Image: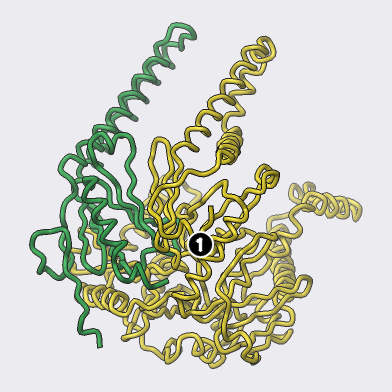
Amino acid sequence: MENTFRNHILHIDDAQIQSPHMTPLADHYAMVNSAVSLLTLLVIIAVALIAIFQPLWPLPDEGRTNAVFIAIAVSISFLLLIVYGYFAEKAKGYCVREQDITLFKGLIFRKIITQPICRIQHIEVKSGPVDRKVELAKLHVYSAGDIAQTFEIPGLPVALANAIRNDILAHKDMQHHG
Amino acid sequence: MSSSDVAGDTTWHRVSPLAILYFIEKLFVGLLNNIFYMLPMFIVLWDEIKANPWIAAGIIIAIITTITCFAVWSFIVFRYRLSAGTVEVKSGIFAKKHVNLPFNRIQNVKIEQPFYYRLFNYSSMAFDSGGSLSQEARLIALPLAFAKELQQEINLFKSNNTDTASTMVEFDTDGQVIVGEHSSISTSPEIIENKRSIGDLVLHGITSNRIYIILAAAAPFVNDIFTFFGDQLAGFGVDIQSHIDNDPMWQISIYALSLFLIAIGLMTILSIIGAIIMFYGYTLSRTEDKYIRRSGLITKHEVSVPFSRIQIAIMKQDFLDILFGRINLRLDQLNAQIANANVSQSGTNKLMVPSVFAYECRDIINHVFPNHQLHEIDFNAISKRFIIRYFSFIVVPIVVVLSHSAYYNEGLSAWVVLGAFTLLSAMVYGRWLRWGYQFNDEYIYIRKGLLGCDRFCLPITKIQRITYSQSLFMRKNKLVSIKLYLASGSYTIPMIDEDQAQYLYEYVLYKVESEAKAWM
């Protein structure tokens, strides 16, 4: 009965592909994201070093050595996390089709999360201070139910994020179905 | 300003400066919530504060000034717009937020009047879109008359645009104005679908542990109870310590065993009492479009659930239920909205029918999900690699640790290790045996459990979102896990054949998107 049902990919040149096809996020997104994490880590390391070596309440020598070791170990593990995070963000992608929106993610666990547009409750385009500097935005998509699991596509150029938002809002099922 | 004026226009409006009070309150509450974490700092600095009260006062004034500044700033950036059946709200100082909520997505409109608005006859409106807490839109500092007008307009809009009738009986509490759509067929006669006798409830008490209800009620008196029993025992001349010190091992074991049995017996009795308190006089009635559950010994609860709101039917059986051939049937509706509305009512989002027989279960579900086959469906097994995965990631590490300590310590014998190994392996195997899934063109069925058995039946058209996931290993073995999100929660089908999963994924999307049926 639904002969008119179509689900072509939008916001990509080749509009004939039917099954979701990953488009990577903005090129500089993963880099910016890791840079911010790295900067935060450096600030924390600096604070930790100041705390360890400050002359006002000097630590006992043994305590100082231990503290330095702990700081190094923690920094290395966070550094590894940041490296992992870089590749994890690099691996993310999305696909907007006529009827649904898909997020691809995961390095070890590959996940394809698809949100039908007729089930979207509302959408938000968010951009924090850093995002605004590099002209990126996050697209938050909310459906009913699960509080913990929201659907978010990061690292989209602002114009594209807004375009996707407007497309979704203009979708006929967003207009008519409750 | 009247709502009919603004309904069509596209300019952004600012709210009354009274909104500043709202932001001050919000920031202050946020600060108070975090003060718990700052307590250690206060304790450490207490002497300093006492020595220099002026500095402390200065800091407090600085904090208050900052809060006020932020509140004013928040007010300045707060804009709203009502256009063509949509509420749009822009807010946020650092992280800009733009909420866009079409009228027909709004499930609830709440008008709230905190004391500082009541003085000026202002109010704030909260729009609940039936999803998570964070997606709630809020309009603040509106004149009360305007808020009421807008509320009516939204209702009018909704009643013109939706044909699904539903009621909001279970949500209106604490005197707030809550408006839902009104059921057009609420006059249809009630038919009693099911009743539960005391015998059923006793059985339910035995099979499922309802002791927590009693414990929750007794919690404030726990200390008194323990002191009371301690004193009583001492009064009888029982000195536990001296028995432990002096009696032979076998005697202590017998004490322990009988204590354990007494405890089990007491718990069962308490559990039965709990079941009776909760489900006394249980009736499940049905009108044309909803189920109404009435039960309760002390407070009578009435929960009414429109069929259209039910997302999933769950047949739950514990080990003992299987033995007695009974089933606890649960019909779940929305998850988050209840959490939104009222925490103390969290029980009402689940329509529970305790300890029913399979045929009753089938009939009850049939009114909600016609032609379901949950009771007779043949489930497909999931991949045997499930066993390998849990064997290698859970059983093997535990057994390695145990054998290591058995080898180096004399306390742990090889038999214990062997026993643990057998038990764990049997559990993994049993779990695999229970996992099952099946689907036809309308419903997806899932079965899981270990000793017990839970069976799920969910209509494909109610699915909100779907996840298709594969680890590296799974990709090599052509296996996929599917996770289905409903408004009532998420449900997983682990490790099934890739072709099947691909087909299911595409079929679910096609069905949901092409039919676009209302999910509530």
In the image: residue A81, left or right of residue B49: left
Q: Position of residue B365 (x, y in %)?
A: 51, 86
* Vertical order, A120 against B447 (above or below): above
Give the x, y percent position of residue B394. Answer: 37, 58
Q: Which residue is mark 1?
A: B336
Q: Could you say which is closer to the camera, residue B287 or residue B7?
A: B7
Of all residues, the one furthest to the right in this rendering is: B235
Horizontal side, residue B181 vs residue A58: left or right: right
Q: 10 Å neighbourhood of mark 1: few (<14), some, or many (≥20)? A: many
**Residue B387 in view of the camera:** no
Extreme-left residue of the structure: A14
* Shade of chain A as shown in the rendered figure: green
Amino acid type assigned to the residue bearing label 1 in the image: Ala
Tell me if residue A50 comes above or below residue B201 in the rendering: above
**Residue extending furthest top?**
A55
Q: Chain of mark 1?
A: B
* Labels in figure, total: 1
Colour scheme employed for the rendering of this structure: by chain
Q: Is residue A54 left or right of residue A163?
A: right
Task: Give the percent coordinates (x, y) of residue B266.
Answer: 74, 68
**Residue ID at (74%, 54%):** B219
Rendered view: A156 above or below B50: below
Towards the viewer: B189 or A169 = A169
Residue B327: quarter of image = bottom right
Residue in front for this viewpoint, A47 or B205: A47
Image location (x, y in percent) of residue B136 = 48, 55
| Residue B516 position by quadrant | bottom left
At 22% from the left and 47% from the top, the residue drawn is A159
Please name the color used to draw chain B: yellow
Instruction: Give the residue at x 41% y 52%.
Output: B99
Q: Is residue B337 left or right of residue A138?
A: right
Q: Secondary structure at mark 1?
A: helix
